[in-house]
Structure formats: structure tokens, C-alpha cells
Image: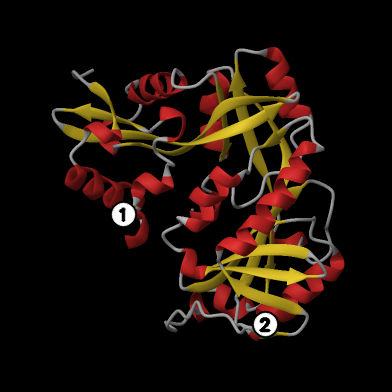
Amino acid sequence: MEKFHIKKISEINEKKLKEFYFKAFNFEKEILDDHFWRYRSGHNNFEPLALIIEDKICGHAGLIPVDIKINNKIEKSIWFTDFFIEKNYRSMGYGKILTESWMKICPTQITLCNEKSLKIFKKLNWSHNRNFIQKKKIFNYLNIMPIFKNSKSFDSTIEKNNGKFEVENVHNKIISKLIDISEKKIACQKTALIRDENWFKWRIIDCPYKKNIFILRYKEKYIVIHVLKKNNLKRLNIIFTSEDINPELLGLLTIFSKKNDIDYLSFVEKKNKLIDGFLPGQRKLNFAFYSNDPLTITELKQNLSDIQYIDSDIDFI
């Protein structure tokens, strides 16, 4: 094993960091220009770590700070995101060292991960459940198939006249309404992710791609959507809802999506809620978590009931 250093990303040359992010993660321009936003750098004084070997960035462990209400007490936590070890240094122990250094940042850690990552977390005594499902509704099946993919230009604009939905761009007044709804909802829960004024300001108001975020309103129900291009497909992520997506809302969202030439829409919800129309495109998510406190582990495993696209980095991967 070669000599190495673990550094915070704020200690690394900005140009070198951007070059690494583009090579390792292929970040889009908005994120490259504002990667400190992606990791909510500065909140609770937490920030990602990088593995340095011979003055070169060879590894990275990202994070997003979040406050969590655990059994009616507010605790600091971090989402584990954007883990990377350069190919030449894999299977040599560097990944374990970087992860263990990352785990010292904060006593409570959470992540949504694939099966390969889950195996690593289990070796580090993380717990997990599969209580959440990522659901997808496809509208243009031909575009989904590689042989039929076209090179159409991406248009993120949304028709404001969309039937029963009132469609609005992001602005402070409507975000204040979302904050009020979110805080009332959290007050009724014993364990929940904290989405307060500070959090909404970071995640939506300061978001580098907020021009592609829209708020749909129907009968005092609010749905926040992110329209983006992914693999040359026009995708609609439902990143936040004030209430669960029921069959009525799904029907309206289907009409809305077809009017706006959406190829598919996707969202996350608690397992065993809405099923119709999503069977071909749904998958259980691995929600993994770690804490030295057994009560925190139990609460996260049994009582955390609301994770959405707006949490973690699932919206932009």
C-alpha cells in the first residue's frame, strides 16, 4: 500500500477537484460549477473526504448533511454519497480506510445503495431495510428501447395550462407554504428527516438547476417535480409531495406527463402503498444506516416512513 492522505475537499485545489469530478462521476456543468451545493458543504461543518496518493485524487467519499428527528430528539446525520476509488487502487484496502475515516465525521449515517455497496456496509456493521420502493411509469416505450432512441433536443419547459394542476416556478411564497406543510407533518412523527426552512433554502431555492423544478398544486396538494434529460430521455422526477401519490393524483400526473412529452416519471414511496401501473418499473431500495446507539438503529429501521427523491442524491444519479 502506497503512502496516502485523507483530506476534506475544501483543502484541495478547485481546478483539480473539478477535473476529478468530471472524470469519476461525469457531473453535469451545473454541478461542476457548484459542487459545494451538491454536498451542502458547511452545514454542521461536515464535508466530503478525498483519498490522495502522490498528490493525485484517487478516491472520494461524498456526503450530504441532514438533521433527523429520532424518537422526538433532533440528531445530526449524513447521507453517504458519491463513493469512488480509482481502478488501479481497488481491492487494496483503500476503500475500507476511506469509508472508516468518513464514518468518524458524524455518529449517525444513512444511505441508499446498490447491492455491491450494501455488502461493504454490512462488513462495517451497518443495518438496512427495504421499506422503500422506486417506482417508474413509462409513457414512451419506443424511446426507452436503445434501438429506437432518437437525438431529439431537450426541452425542459412545462405548459402552464395543464388541466387541473396549477403549475408554478420556484418562488419564495410557495416554498414557504411547503415549509409549513413539511414542518406540520414532521411534528406528528416520532422519527423523520428534517425538511425545515434551512433545508428547503439549500435544496430548492439555491439549487443550481431550479429552472427545471416546478410546483404542481391540486386541491391544496403540492407536488414538486424536476424535469431533466437522462440518457436522451425526458424524465420527470417527483421529488417531493405533501401527500402520498394516490390513484387520482397518478391519473392527473399521467395526463400532465403526456401533454409535456415526458418519456417516464419516477418517484419513491413506502412499500405496499400504490401498486397499479408501476409493476414493470419498480424496484426495492436498499436503505442502510449506522449508529452506535441501538435506539437510533431501531427507530431508523422501524419508524422512518418518508424518503423521497428530494432526499439524498437519488434525484441526480
Please tell me the numbered disc located at residue 258.
2
Label 1, on which residue?
A: 32
Is residue 98 shown above or below 85?
Answer: above
Residue 129: quadrant of the picture: top right
Residue at (74% x, 40% y) in the render: 186
Between marks 1 and 2 in the image, the one whose residue lies nearer the viewer = 1
Percent position of residue 145, x then y: 56, 73
Instruction: Give the image's coloring scheme.
Output: secondary structure
The amino acid sitting under disc 1 is Leu
Q: Which of 39 and 25 is in front in this view?
A: 39
The amino acid sitting under disc 2 is Lys
Residue 83: quadrant of the picture: top left
Can the viewer see residue 230? no
Give neighbour class at mark 2: few <14, some 14-19, many 20+ (Cα, 10 Å): few
Percent position of residue 265, x then y: 65, 67
Mark 1 element type: helix
Residue at (28% x, 52% y) in the render: 22
Residue at (57% x, 73% y) in the render: 144
Q: Locate residue 262 relative to residue 10 in the image: left or right.
A: right
